[in-house]
Amino acid sequence: MKKVVATIFCALMLCGLLLITVGATMATETDYERTSYPTQVTPTIDGQWTSPDEWTDGAETWIGTDIVFRSTWDGDMTRWLVEFLTDTTNNPGDYLQFCIDPQQWGGSEPELGHHFMLQITGHTELTRYTVNNGEWYYWEGSTLAVEWAASLSTSPTSSTPHWIYELQIDRASATLSWGDPWNFLLGVFDASNPGDGLQSWPPTDPDVPDEYGIENYSVELIPEGLTFAVMALLTTFSMLVGYKYFVKRKETKTQ
């Protein structure tokens, strides 16, 4: 009887944990949301973790299991770290794409005056794009101030050298009004593995602003300690180990 009760208890706990996790993280492609926290350690924009705590003030957001990014904000500055953990080759066809809808305008295609895009190609060149007849078009004369860098480097995330991008964007320098929150799509492409295509958050079409995610700003500092996801995994693991031990102990007693 005790074994049955223990089984039911663990099942209910796991179901509850799953429901909380799903409610916090699962959404339709058009409802992806994340939070940017205030900058506590101003990063050096050099394409690498300059100090171990440089980006710990930003919450992790994963694209699959190979790409992770963080963001923080300070006044008009929005700062981003993107790590492509499995991209270890210097290929001129690699690129990072950052599509931005600063006023959450949405739409079935990019529109002039409402959307723009940044693209870093070959880890060496940043191009700003505006829109012309629903298509991305070189933004000549853009005043958007972007400081950025990329390098093959190690980090606290991975000891294997991989491509790391850092960007700092002055929202006040944009010719388009930039609100809070705002929408975006962030993606990377590894030319060494073209079959993977553009791996992005959200995993949608960069030419359809209706399918971008939402960037919220928090005035509170990032919560200390483990993230909810890690806590959930550790809690689940502990419960499973505890249950296994309980069953094994019970079986030992009855033998």
Image: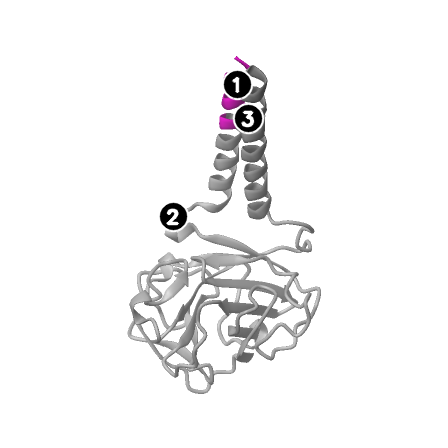
For label 3, the crowd category at 10 Å Cα-Cα, with few meaning under 14, some 14 to 19 and many 20 or more, is few
Amino acid type, label 1: Lys
Residue 108 in the image: state x and y as whole percent: 31, 61
In magenta, the rendered stretch is 1-11
The residue at which mark 1 appears reads as: 3
Amino acid type, label 2: Thr
Q: Is residue 176 above or below residue 217?
A: below
Q: Earlier in the sequence, mark 3 or mark 2?
A: 2
Residue 31 vs residue 151: left or right? left
Residue 208 in the image: state x and y as whole percent: 33, 62
Q: Which element is circle 1 on?
A: helix
* Magenta stretch: includes residue 10: yes
Viewer-nearest residue: 78 or 224: 224
Q: Earlier in the sequence, mark 1 or mark 2?
A: 1
The residue at which mark 3 appears reads as: 248
Q: Which element is circle 2 on?
A: loop
Q: Earlier in the sequence, mark 3 or mark 1?
A: 1
For label 2, the crowd category at 10 Å Cα-Cα, with few meaning under 14, some 14 to 19 and many 20 or more, is few
In the rendered image, the residue lying farthest to the front is 255
Q: State which quadrant residue 55 falls in.
A: bottom right
> How far apart are the alpha carbons under marks 1 and 2?
39 Å
The residue at which mark 2 appears reads as: 28
Residue 185 vs residue 249: left or right? left
For label 1, the crowd category at 10 Å Cα-Cα, with few meaning under 14, some 14 to 19 and many 20 or more, is few
